Amino acid sequence: MNTDLSATEDFIEEYRLKLGEKIRIVREQRGYSQEQLATLMNVNRSTISKIENSKFSITVDYLIRFSIVLNYEFKIVEM
């Protein structure tokens, strides 16, 4: 049972890293600094940094905000 839990945690961490990297790439492609994006999303710049660096568990609400502000559709992971 611990093996399955460990694999799940590994998957979550890997996905969180990929998502943060994707957000950073799209943010930069759109020409926003972390500060500018934070202002548009009404959050602290440190929150953007933590999300991009996988130090913050992103919620669906944040993901929707990123999608709207960055005009980007994040794909759902197929398992």
Image (cartoon, grey):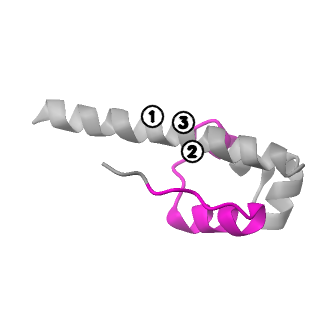
Residue under label 2: 19
Distance between mark 3 and mark 1 Cα atoms? 5 Å
**What residue span does the magenta drawing correspond to?**
49-76
Which residue sits at x=51%, y=65%?
60
Is residue 35 rendered magenta in the image?
no
Name the element at disc 3.
helix
The quadrant in which residue 74 appears is bottom right
Residue type for callout 2: Leu
| Residue 15 horizontal side relative to residue 65, left or right | left
Relative vertical location of residue 48 with respect to residue 3 in this rendering, above or below: below
Whether pointer 3 and pointer 1 mark residues with C-beta atoms closer than 8 Å, the reply is: yes
Residue type for callout 1: Glu
Mark 1 packing: few (<14 Cα in 10 Å), some, or many (20+)?
few
Residue type for callout 3: Leu
Residue under label 3: 17
| Residue 36 horizontal side relative to residue 10, left or right | right
Mark 2 packing: few (<14 Cα in 10 Å), some, or many (20+)?
many
Name the element at disc 1.
helix
Q: Quadrant of the N terminus?
A: top left
Residue 26: % across, % down: 74, 48
| Residue 15 horizontal side relative to residue 6, left or right | right
